[in-house]
Image (spheres, helix red, strand yellow):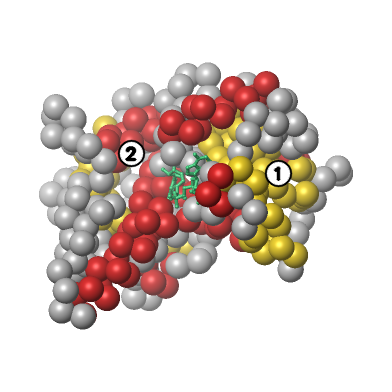
Amino acid sequence: MKSCRIAILGATGAVGRTMLQVLEEQTDWPVGPVKLLASPRSAGQTLMFKGQPLTLEAVSEDSFADVDVVLGAVENELAKRWAPVIVNAGAVFVDNSSAFRLDPDVPLVIPQINPQDIRTHQGIIANPNCATIIALMAVAPIYRLSRITRMIVSTYQAVSGAGAAGLAELKRQIAQLEAGQPASAETFPVQIAYNLIPQIGGFDEQGYSSEEMKLQNEGRKILHDPALRVSCTCVRVPVLRCHSESITLETEREVSLDEVRRAIMEAEGVILNEQPYPTPLACTDQDTVEVGRLRRDLASEQGIALWCCGDQLRKGAATNAVEIVRALWQGQEI
Ligand SMILES: NC(=O)c1ccc[n+]([C@@H]2O[C@H](COP(=O)([O-])OP(=O)(O)OC[C@H]3O[C@@H](n4cnc5c(N)ncnc54)[C@H](OP(=O)(O)O)[C@@H]3O)[C@@H](O)[C@H]2O)c1
């Protein structure tokens, strides 16, 4: 099999660096050469890949002529700016921003759930929102037992979900407070150290934040179920890495907890952890989503409640994107 030439656009960021790490770990398909792209601020710096320093380049119109796939790890406006250049150069753009996720011409893919959608791409494939990937990895085994009609979700999202700057802000604020100084808030709307912030993204006219609407909108597209109803509260928590979610769902047919346990244990990419339960620290730097605290919902006949944790930089972003590329490459559908 010929080698897949990959560029990472946004290679210095929280997601971009994790992509490089995940690519380094690939052993069963041929990856490389790898090109690192970022802003002019990073040009000339190096990052290590397979024991060798790779030099970062400032992204330009000529960056994509010699690559098969571009892994996107930049904000929406930059993804929109470079997508046509990438596609015109003949490469496939696997994008982590939300710029193209709801575009009907762009497949939105979690390879363990809707791999068939990869084949419909026209040059761009979108990686879903990180909290959406983690929630759907946990509930898809249940959905395969019976359609899920509604979900109530509360998220507990790590600071690295806001990128390298979010991670730096929590560490800086803790140091400032320990030194007796006031904590300065730049990335988050208020102090995150020793606090919780019930806002991720801007609010709409109904009072939901942009992050809260992603689970319903993206969940409908991934599950091919336009009637799925999700009501979500997204909270930023002072955790470095890994998103956690409390999910209460209702199924069309009543399913037993034993059926659910078996379905989760048999599903790819998910682990049932009831000894005693998943935590973000224990899930850090792993690709599997852990599910625990499985119980009947006391407020609904057909309801099930669960808790799940997943590393949002790996399965919520870099790993999912690399899995898409691997599936594409092995199917040679580029
Ligand atoms: N963090 C997460 O958990 C997560 C999860 C899923 C999806 N995402 C999405 O993934 C994308 C990247 O997020 P992130 O958290 O990795 O952000 P980040 O840590 O802030 O990294 C941003 C990247 O964009 C690059 N960049 C900034 N301005 C640029 C320019 N003018 N030209 C080229 N590159 C430029 C930066 O390069 P310089 O260092 O040179 O500035 C850096 O590599 C976003 O769309 C985000 O919504 C993030």
Q: Secondary structure at mark 1?
A: strand
The amino acid type found where label 1 is placed reads Ile
Q: Quadrant of the N terminus?
A: top right
In the current view of this chain or complex, which residue is farthest to the bottom? 179
Whether residue 233 is visible here, answered yes or no, is yes
For mark 1, what is the residue?
Answer: 6
- Label placed on residue 313: none
The amino acid type found where label 2 is placed reads Leu
Q: Position of residue 210 (x, y in %)?
A: 27, 36
Q: Position of residue 225 (x, y in %)?
A: 39, 27
Which residue is drawn at the image coordinates 21% and 80% (left, top)?
178
Q: Position of residue 92 (x, y in %)?
A: 66, 31
How many discs mark residues in the rendered view? 2
Q: Secondary structure at mark 2?
A: helix
Looking at this view, is 74 or 311 the one in front?
74
Q: Is residue 148 left or right of residue 34?
A: left
Gap in angstroms between the C-alphas marked 2 and 1: 29 Å
Q: Is residue 147 left or right of residue 206?
A: right
For mark 2, what is the residue?
Answer: 215
> Within 10 angstroms of label 2, few (less than 14), some, or many (20 or more) residues?
many
Which residue is drawn at the image coordinates 37% and 62% (left, top)?
167
- Relative to 111, does residue 197 appear above or below in the rendering? below
